[in-house]
Amino acid sequence: MELALEKAAPSSLVGAALFFSCLGGTVATVVAEREQQTLKRLFISPLSGTSYFLGIFLAHSCIGIGQTLLVYIVAGFWGATFQGSIFLGIVIILLSIIAYVGMGFVLGTQLARRTEDVNALVATFGVPLLILGGTFFPTSLFPKTLLDIAKYNPIYHMNEALLAVSANGEEFSDVISHLRFLLFFATLTLIFGWISYRLKLIVEKRL
């Protein structure tokens, strides 16, 4: 049972908990703030757009960190242990949070128009990514063609990296390719998320 939990905890965390809280939560927050006219009130307040962006980012980061602690506390209660470097695990989790929040800003500002759109949007983009990322079943069962496609999926790299470190005790050199992809993707989504947010502010200011 301990081994099963050690294998399940990483995928449950980055493939489910962080996905719905950091990506889905960011999309829902951005859409709700727009519908409630919070963005318009931002223009007459001393709060800058940068502070608002960072506030949402840090809020969902704290939620993600809380979920991480909850998942591993529950797993630890049943005897599971974190096999590898805790520092390396934290790096992987933080990169995953950044990537999810960045994607959430892009989707929330560019594609979702109403609160009702959030669930459909997250499901449309999320379910295929979760399946290809190995959240519901191990990627070792994938045929080669599907595995080649999965390697372009950030959730695949999140799952594989955290699983390797958490359950298998692998070191930095063993997951370097996953970390490079996650660093690149997290940086890219954060930049595009910021640009999308700034463009949305310009549009809201004109309305």
Image (cartoon, rainbow, N blue to C red):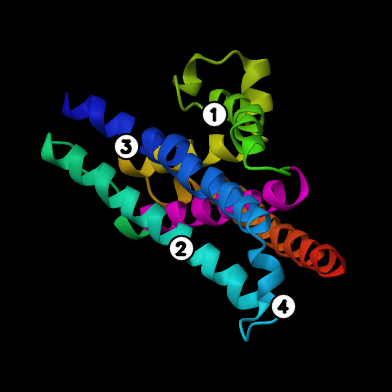
Dot 4 amino acid type: Phe
Residue 47 or 197: which is nearer the viewer? 47
Q: Specify few, some or many for label 3: CA neighbours under 10 Å numbering under 14, 14-19, or 20 or more.
A: some
Q: Helix or strand or loop: what does disc 2 sit on? A: helix
Q: Specify few, some or many for label 2: CA neighbours under 10 Å numbering under 14, 14-19, or 20 or more.
A: few
Residue 70 or 80: which is nearer the viewer? 70
- Of badges 3 and 1, the one in the foreground is 1
Q: Which region shows up in magenta? A: 88-111
Indicate left or right for 177 with 74 as reference. right
Labels 3 & 2 near each other (Cβ < 8 A): no
Which residue is disc 1 drawn over?
Answer: 130
Dot 1 amino acid type: Leu
Which residue is disc 4 drawn over?
Answer: 43
Residue 36 within the magenta-colored segment of the rendering: no
Labels 3 & 1 near each other (Cβ < 8 A): no
- Of badges 4 and 2, the one in the foreground is 4
Labels 1 & 4 near each other (Cβ < 8 A): no
Percent of width and height locating residue 32: 60, 52
Q: Which mark is residue 168?
A: 3
Percent of width and height locating residue 91: 44, 58
- Counting residues from the start of the chain, the first of labels 3 and 1 encountered is 1
Q: Is residue 85 visible?
A: no
Q: CA distance from mark 4 to mark 3?
A: 50 Å
What residue appears at the point 62 percent right and 42 percent down from the top-left corner?
A: 115
Which residue is disc 2 drawn over?
Answer: 59
Labels 4 & 2 near each other (Cβ < 8 A): no
Indicate left or right for 111 with 61 as reference. right
Image quadrant where residue 121 sits: top right
